Image (cartoon, rainbow, N blue to C red):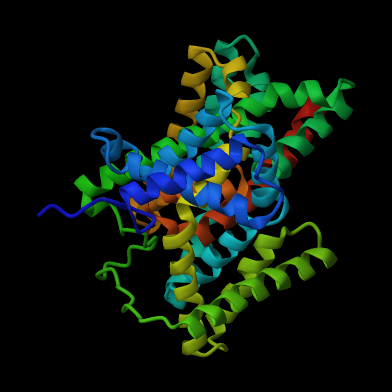
Amino acid sequence: MKEQRKILGLPLPLYAVVFLLTVACMLTGCIPDSLVPAFLVLMVFGEGLNTIGNSVPVVKTYLGGSVICILGAAVIRAVGLIPQQTFETLDSFVNGHGFLIFYIAALITGSLFNIDRNLLLKATVKLLPVAVVSLAVGILVSGLFGMALGNGFWGGILYIGVPMTSGGMTAGTVPLSSMYSQALGVDAADVLTRMAPATVLGNCVAIIFGGLLNNFGNHHPEMTGNGVLVNDGKPVKKTPPMKPTFALLCTGMVIALAFYQLGAILHHFVTIIPTYAWMIIAVVLVKGTGIMSEELEDAAREWGYFAIHSWTAAALTGIGFTLIDLNTILKTLTPLYLIAVVLIVASITFTAAVLGRLVGFYPLEAAIAAGMCTTNMGGSGNVAVLSSAHRMELLPFAQIVTRSCGALMLTLGGILVQIVG
């Protein structure tokens, strides 16, 4: 007898009832600005989209559920199927009330404590040079396409290459628009409108590339460490499975949130370094020195696994609903502009794979962590890309690359606009 399909652990008919109940609440305005309805909408829609992405032929092979969660939610929003009250509630929950922070904090601590400390230190030292050189190639390609698009070499760099690689919208493109407006004496809103499509579209292309690279890795296992970055010639070490208890998961949650809070305190005093960067530094120091017991490290690791398995579809759907504006992209999109963005991401990705292999990384993991994650929209973009690539273990490295390279590109953009703007 064929096993009945389940979504969220529910038989399909019961899931359909919950889905219809959720939609009815949305349409009747019963989605107030609070945790419960927002969480329910993201869980129900997220797992539904994830199931579609992992079930439909061709789609499941080349994209998968993670990509469909993001793009499917973005399409639903773009065609106006999300009532305004629901959108505001989801936006507040995902971005204002910190659902993504809660989720990403669990992933960072869980994945860092899951890495061998020697490999962690070895990888971090080599990763940034690979990312910076890969970025330089992508910026050169953006200048060439700027000429083809009629914006000039420096125009392509300033309005396509730099925004794509500046670390996201709020931490990158928005401050860039302010810098440009001051230097050029124009309205910052006009500058932001011109740059935003490159930022959003670059992340979308990276998400799709992540799904394609995962499929490539399945057919070429010699090119991937299946989430392990450093290729030291030894078999990939598998962490033994655990049997987490409720108490252990609670301890892991507290550890993750405490590290995030430590990062927030350090950012308060040294604002040039973002909270997530401070958090990563703190976890790396604790992991590298071994001052925390193995039992507590395991608790953090298991909490990270729990977050991945429970809320990834919800988080990705929240990103699609609130952070991916397809209407903004479509207003500026031309075939040549799309080709430009695709080839910029491709050139960065390919360069990172080649250089990564030369310095002792698995090419596929290097292409993702040191390549595609330079074109992401901050932490949420990293989650989206790594989820589509099924390489969530790389999140700490992705955060290091995104934040460090984003700060570098902000500086470069501010200098270039003064010289050639």
Res 131 visible:
no
Quadrant where the C terminus is found in the figure: top right
Instruction: Using residue 67 as the reference point, say whether residue 213 is left or right of it.
Output: left
The tally of labels here is: 0
Up the image or down, 265 lies above or below 221; here it is below
Quadrant where the N terminus is found in the figure: bottom left
Residue at coordinates 75% horizontally, 66% vertically from top-left?
264
Spot the residue most to the top. Answer: 150
Viewer-nearest residue: 66 or 181: 66
Res 314 visible:
yes
Residue at coordinates 78% horizontally, 31% vertically from top-left?
177
Viewer-nearest residue: 155 or 269: 269
Viewer-nearest residue: 190 or 360: 190
List x then y, in percent, for residue 308.
45, 61
List x then y, in percent, for residue 178.
83, 33
Up the image or down, 103 lies above or below 371; here it is below
| Occupied quadrant, residue 90 | top right
Up the image or down, 201 lies above or below 223; here it is above
List x then y, in percent, for residue 65.
37, 44
Spot the residue most to the left. Answer: 1
Instruction: Using residue 402 as the reference point, say whether residue 18 is left or right of it.
Output: left
List x then y, in percent, for residue 69.
45, 41
Residue at coordinates 62% horizontally, 25% vertically from top-left?
197
Residue at coordinates 66% horizontally, 61% vertically from top-left?
276
Viewer-nearest residue: 190 or 69: 69
